[in-house]
Image (cartoon, helix red, strand yellow):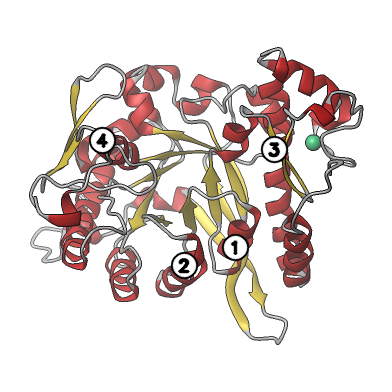
Amino acid sequence: MAGHAPPGAAADPAVRPHPRQGEFGFTVGTRLCRPDGSPALGRTGTITTPHGRIRTPAFVTVGTKATVKTVLPESVRELGAQAVLANAYHLYLQPGADVLDEAGGLGAFMNWDGPTFTDSGGFQVMSLGSGFKKVIDMTAVETSGADDAVAPGKERLANVDEDGVWFKSHLNGDMHRFSPEISMGVQHRIGADIMFAFDELTTLHNSRSYQVESLERTRRWAERCIAEHFRLTDERAHKPYQALFGVIQGAQYRDLRRKACLDLGALPFDGFGIGGALEKENLGTIVGWCSAALPEDKPRHLLGISEPDDLFTAIENGADTFDCVSPTRVARNSAFYTPHGRFNLAGQRYKRDFTPLQEGCDCYTCANYTRAYIHHLYKAKEMLSHTLISIHNERFVVRMVDNAREAIGNGTFFELKERTLSAYYAGKPDPQGP
Ligand SMILES: [Zn+2]
């Protein structure tokens, strides 16, 4: 940041915007209104990145290791995905961020010319480290009660201190260090259009006092991320501008979420991620608290949702983008989405079912293949089944969010929500199949 702050400036240099931030943009389009005419928090918008635009709300496909599992990048484009999110932790361990830097960045490396995201690595460092999945916990400092919980039967693989986190590679057990500065360095070398600040994750099991302490640490880390991000932006002036999103923690506490939004909202982030363990029943409430308290003119990303009810709830409460591994993960277990629920193609009833996965679906898979064929592939352990179901599932979720965006634009969001969710969760599926 040296060189940007005038001599004798009293303010923390990290809080001054960087001149190149204008290369990233967000504009709000239509604001969502409730049926009674009162304003809701949802909106449409457009995110502008050096690799193209994202019309929001948008579902961002996950390509953890620089690949949307089993799906060609050309197919990812064809199924309507607007952006891909990769994982800094995985790419740091393998093949190494330097390799992506040499390749010209994540997009060039994986032959995806659209916008890209990377998460900070914090979630994987800390969640893989504690053995928990979504509900994670880690601290070397406190040793009593829930604040030191580790998943049963799991060894603690990550320890947090004020400066950062030591963690053990899930690949070979080697020890590695992540800190705000290291995460920024890794994410700059990976080169995605949108990066996330390195934050500490807490769980719903942590005590409130630990949440307070952790939130302060995340704020200090956020300032360090911005300072290092701006330094790297200057150092790598020949590279396309990479935007940085701050991550809002605060668990299920309204005052803590609000404090995080105000603290981080005052910093020159390009956007925000809403993070932390969210219980399904509190999702809308917590996203709503954050949307109401964050700067209106910056995009908000919600990490890790794809169930139809969660998507509509998040959109209604002001989330602009979301990502999730589910569409491809469940596809590898032969589950496919339809407007009438999720079904499992492994069932014998599909053996002679020569209809597409979803009647009327506009995806490549449904245009060309039958349930009987994909059922056969799955039973025969042919990898093509993963590819074909993944294409359909990704298209299904992308299309659902596209429809929600269009419905905000033409004032039919709540009708679409009611119609979509009542069909999807109609109860027991027809035993003859959807
Ligand atoms: Zn389809």
Mark 3, residue position: 393
Of labels 2 and 3, earlier in sequence is 2
Badge 1: residue crowd in 10 Å (few <14, some 14–19, many ≥20)? many
Would you say residue 188 is visible in this rendering? no
Frontmost of labels 3 and 1 is: 3
Cα distance in 3D space between marks 3 and 1: 19 Å
Mark 2, residue position: 282
Task: Identify which amino acid the numbered label 4 is placed on.
Answer: Gly
Of labels 4 and 1, earlier in sequence is 4
Cα distance in 3D space between marks 4 and 1: 31 Å
Task: Identify which amino acid the numbered label 1 is placed on.
Answer: Ile
Cα distance in 3D space between marks 4 and 3: 30 Å
Of labels 1 and 2, earlier in sequence is 2
Tell me if residue 412 comes above or below residue 152 in the rendering. below
- Residue 252 point in image, percent of width and height: 35, 67
Task: Identify which amino acid the numbered label 3 is placed on.
Answer: Asn
Residue placed most toward the observer, 427 or 291? 427
- Residue 94 point in image, percent of width and height: 36, 18
Q: Taking 242 as reference, is 57 left or right?
A: right
